[in-house]
Amino acid sequence: MTASIRQMGVITAHLIRKVAFNPAVVWLIAMPLVIIYILGITMHGLFSAEFTPVKPYRIVVALPEEAGFLVERISRAPKHFAVEEARDAQEARQAVFQRQADAAIVAADGDEPLTVIAPPGSIVLEMLAGVVQASLEQEAQQVAAAQPPVENGSREESDTGARSAGAADGALSAMPWEGVGSFEYFSIGLIVMFMAFASHSAMVHCVQDRSTGAYLRIRALGVTRAVYLGAGITSGMLLGAGFSLVMAVITWTLFRVVWGNAAAWALMTIAGAASVASLSFLLTALLPSDPKGVENAGGTVYSLLAFFGGSTVPLTIMPRWFSEIFSWLPNRKMLDGYLKIVKGAGVKEIEQELFGLAAAALIMLGLAWLVVMLLKREEV
């Protein structure tokens, strides 16, 4: 056991050294920094309070006297909304359906609740939903303050119910990417994306060792295949984690990205590095032992994952169904976890993402090892 651990350590150090001292590592660090800067500058208006549309969204309101609190709040942002009055609910709806207005607000009327009408997944719908929720919360607080004192037991029960309802509403409406700036978002997204490339480079070198005969010479020294593959996975994990650390320091220095809780960041980085190293191992196991083919396949897969996981296209402008349907992807788990951390989350708040990444890493490792044992048994 001691000899195997020592052998794995030597091979791991060798693979890390080959990647670290490769001139291409300069591009691996410089390229995401350039992309972060360009996207951070050009797309800053799509994030949180920085967003301002080219022209104010036209909002048609029916029964404005019944929704005065909401109209007043919307009118405070003339750069974002232009409020107009409609005769009735039908006219307000038709204005949206005929594309004469960007959204409509139909105030509560009898048993009918307040309704916001806008194209599904549109930015104006997301903005109005947040305004409506804030307005309703403000009204509820005013009503509660105006109520006479009640017995302690009833008040505690009421307060508990209000807190539970507020927590539930927040969990449903708040997304990890809400409230962050463009540089924070793209720093995280690009680091997640290029962490996979950094990790995959270790596996590419493992495949190159087979083509150059270095693998056979290593095996001739008494190194088992399990030890060699374990060294490849470990080096990929360490390269991914090391890349994240370097980029976190650089983005903090250049773009003032505050990465938040150190313990939460470290756990997320370790779990993320393990998942991307496992994915790299799985790709290597499924593909023929051709270094160029493995490298190209990794680039294609990681680019697709970056798109669907929200690293290159911000989730702030994507429809809600897009963010929900791909939420299971490992790189998306990393993106959500890091976004929570920069917003002040600790270890407890990212438990779901950590468990998801750990499960993904174990599943991919198991599948990759099964493929190696069943389909590549002829390899020494």
Image: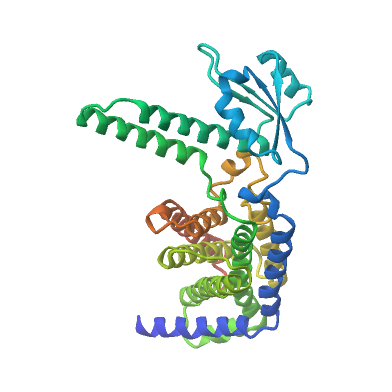
Spot the residue most to the top: 110
- Of 14 and 100, nearer the camera is 100
Figure colour scheme: rainbow
The N terminus is located in which quarter?
A: bottom left
Residue 341 lies, with reference to residue 138, above or below; the image says below
- Of 338 and 141, nearer the camera is 141
What percent of the width, then of the height, locates residue 347? 39, 59
Residue 334 lies, with reference to residue 215, above or below; the image says above
**Number of marks in the image?**
0
What percent of the width, then of the height, locates residue 364? 51, 58
- Of 48 and 303, nearer the camera is 48
What percent of the width, then of the height, locates residue 369? 49, 63
- Of 3 and 9, nearer the camera is 9
What percent of the width, then of the height, locates residue 2? 35, 84
Res 195 quadrant in image: bottom right
The C terminus is located in which quarter?
A: bottom right
Residue 32 lies, with reference to residue 209, above or below; the image says above
